[in-house]
Amino acid sequence: MAGVEQRQNKSGGGKKKEVKKETGLGLSFTKDENFGEWYSEVVVNGEMIEYYDISGCYILRPWAISIWEIMQTFFDAEIKKMKVKNCYFPLFVSPGVLQKEKDHIEGFAPEVAWVTKSGESELEVPIAIRPTSETVMYPYYSKWIRGHRDLPLKLNQWCNVVRWEFSNPTPFIRSREFLWQEGHTAFATKEEADTEVLQILELYRCIYEEFLAIPVTKGRKSELETFAGGLYTTSVEAFIPNTGRGIQGATSHCLGQNFAKMFEINFENEKGEKGMVWQNSWAYSTRTIGVMVMVHGDDKGLVLPPKVAALQLIVIPVPYKDADTQGIFDACVATVATLSDAGIRAEADLRDNYSPGWKYSNWEMKGVPLRIEIGPRDLANNQVRAVRRDNGAKTDISRVFLVEQVKGMLDKIQQNLFDVAKQKRDACVEVLKTWEEFVTALGQKKLILAPWCDEEDVEKDVKARTKGDMGAAKSLCTPFEQPELPEGTKCFASGKPAKKWTYWGRSY
Amino acid sequence: MAGVEQRQNKSGGGKKKEVKKETGLGLSFTKDENFGEWYSEVVVNGEMIEYYDISGCYILRPWAISIWEIMQTFFDAEIKKMKVKNCYFPLFVSPGVLQKEKDHIEGFAPEVAWVTKSGESELEVPIAIRPTSETVMYPYYSKWIRGHRDLPLKLNQWCNVVRWEFSNPTPFIRSREFLWQEGHTAFATKEEADTEVLQILELYRCIYEEFLAIPVTKGRKSELETFAGGLYTTSVEAFIPNTGRGIQGATSHCLGQNFAKMFEINFENEKGEKGMVWQNSWAYSTRTIGVMVMVHGDDKGLVLPPKVAALQLIVIPVPYKDADTQGIFDACVATVATLSDAGIRAEADLRDNYSPGWKYSNWEMKGVPLRIEIGPRDLANNQVRAVRRDNGAKTDISRVFLVEQVKGMLDKIQQNLFDVAKQKRDACVEVLKTWEEFVTALGQKKLILAPWCDEEDVEKDVKARTKGDMGAAKSLCTPFEQPELPEGTKCFASGKPAKKWTYWGRSY
């Protein structure tokens, strides 16, 4: 609107503080002082999320969906190489099937949304909306799998699922509907299933570490934290230093033969003997995007890793009153063309109703990894000025070496984001051995690595003893990379002989 | 299973009828004699669909999803060129918003599924599942659009929608949940909106004619058939000769300013004047796949156009007792490698527990466009035998010219499928001018083109007068390509002066 535009024009190339005050472009909260409010504000002002009129549901705007699509393109191609095929099963589940596997449904029942009406008519039987698709799919696995030649069966679907949670809805992190992929595979042998669990987990590591620039720990979940109805669960675990909370990044489950038994998924092997299949299921969701925002974002807004950014680079003309404005604009357009041809996702912001300063703040808020400014001096020197979003570093680049320099900077930004995140995460890790140390470290928002006896009752006890406003502590994962565990080491919580090193902490 | 396999082995290279009888590979119904049963059988036996335990919901198997993905890749890239951005809005709608636009909700209310419970708790307010997303999205368009610089706003989402219909559920064609894309755009002027409606319609034509090899008619819907709440609806209309029914292929609606008024989507133009946006919405769905099956399928099963087939070519070894079996198998593998390198989607069926004859039937059922057989004679002559799925034509191809010949044949198959379908469709068109001719033609399952006065009451009257077991006739579309309408031509139904030529018939 003209009114707003005029005010914005007035702010001109002035200091950032003025722009913020006049246009409301900046954030009202800081990441360190009020993390929760900062997060809500940054996902909205960064144009990833719009709050929706149903609590716990969020609108995913193009800025978020483009990140999702980049990860999807990578993951989809990788699983297709593994001979996984995409399919689509219905959103709805009949109650009988949903409840077939007892442990499984106990895990999900409180969160299941039920359709009971269509138009003005009551349905004869209420119908559930999938919270996950094990019970939706496996009756058909039983039908499709007859002999060993039907194995392995490897299916995946990209879809929405619904879990009607009531505690702390948070965009991306905990929402009532979310997008994910869910893979569901069946094998003749446990060995094949075990192998695939780890292949998929490696892809999830790749998404976090190589795309989102977030360090994660691969490991196995405790008995208590294992997927409802599954045999064992592996995960990649991330950590949010500001809140001192662990966050489950993605999970790859071996379901064993438990569902196979309930759904009678049998096959005849080469020798004509009857067997039961071994199954896996694995998923990652739009939660990934939330973790990325939490880990990299700062007080200026989002910070996007170049590999997932819809826009890797924004070119901003910086005209000056007597200078060759048209020449500057032409140089911006030419720069974008050169970079686009080289496969870099670049655009120019040529709007004439915003000042350069306003544009800087705007694209910083949106987290674009690299900004290129072109002013009269740059034009004269056949150069551009590049400003990194991650650390603010400014470099003058000759237009002769534009493409290679920009590529190099994007790579460095990607690497630096990971390195800084890893450094921050590592600084939070506390290796300890006693309950007293544990309580202190928990109070200091640490990610705790402690020797554990691996008993379910002990984990329950830890939860009970740490209950409070902040939520109880729990085991996050037992990392595959285990430090040495000297003979005689005792469990931090029970004093019994320790069996493994396990990560503990509060979590999302 | 071994038992089945033995029986299948016994059938050996025997005649197809024996294979069919022994293995149940063939279809029990023919397309001409029992179209409905044939269709249900072919989508299941062709492994596109599995029936699900909730009526009107179907499992889309990889063979169907791969077609969907190919169309999606095309369409998604095209709309991105048009600067449309993908987003994701929630599955759920609150009742207040859903009911805001009266005409619109009247159109959808009887089919809306309602969530009233989560876990064991009743929801305070029942929540609807989106049947389409106009009312989900437009409150936010009102928020996001302020000035002319926010326009055009062009969003699209790939998602599932739910319409709890009770009449004649049919896989792909009429299901309670289906996948689609829905584009929702807003413009400053009606001209821009009008232009986009037709650009999108052209993409839909392309999907049908160039990908699915199905002839369609572009045109405008009658008042009675216009999208609920919209200004006008354009569509591509296909026709199923076997049932004599038209089928709406995809729709591109101009919504006018009706939703803008209800949802207060206003903007200020360059001169500071207030205006209301002009909106479009447009969608195509998994219905496309059903139309493809209906149009091209035959008594041997599916027939897939090469451009959308997950597998364009299947290579089958035809060993003979004393021949060089290993040499034949090696030639099959080499053939696949050569074709794959050339970008052709090819695989070899090297299973040793099925006879060549069984494999022929199997891949014919699945509709693979081209089969390559390699036997001892082919090996000796450095050639392969190619068999077209569409017309059964057999050609020996020298392995020297393999890639170019196969490419040529796939192009010819694609073209031939379209030509044959067009010929069949055109043969059903009946141009007529009187009610008597109309009734006769309807009885003969014709696609009727008749002069019409374009009055809503007259269309209602046509519906009433043709009601019966087969369903009433209605207007399908007024084609953009209009034959000449001589002065004084009368409406076939009312006898009033005709304004246009319109297609009529029964429809899906």
Image: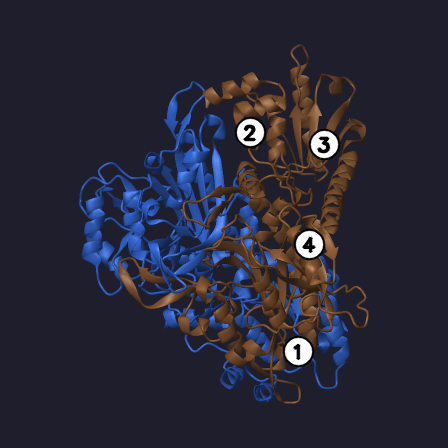
Chain colours: A blue, B brown
User: Which mark is nearer the camera, 3 or 1?
Assistant: 3
**Vertical placement of B241 versus B135: above or below?**
above
Which chain letter goes with mark 3?
A: B
Q: How far apart are labels 4 and 1 at the CA level?
A: 60 Å
* 3D distance between C-alphas at marks 3 and 4: 33 Å
In percent of width and height, residue B42 lies at: 57, 39
- The residue lying toward the viewer, choosing from B496 and B185, is B496
Mark 3 and mark 1 in contact? Answer it, CB < 8 Å.
Answer: no
The residue to which callout 1 is attached is A351
Marks 2/4 in contact by CB < 8 Å: the verdict is no
Across and down, in percent, residue B40 comes to: 53, 42
Residue neighbourhood size for the residue with mark 3, other residues' Cα within 10 Å, grouped as few (<14), some (14–19), many (≥20): few
Chain letter behind tag 2: B
Of marks 4 and 1, the one in the foreground: 4
Label 3: element kind: loop
Q: Which residue is mark 4?
A: B441
Q: Chain of mark 4?
A: B
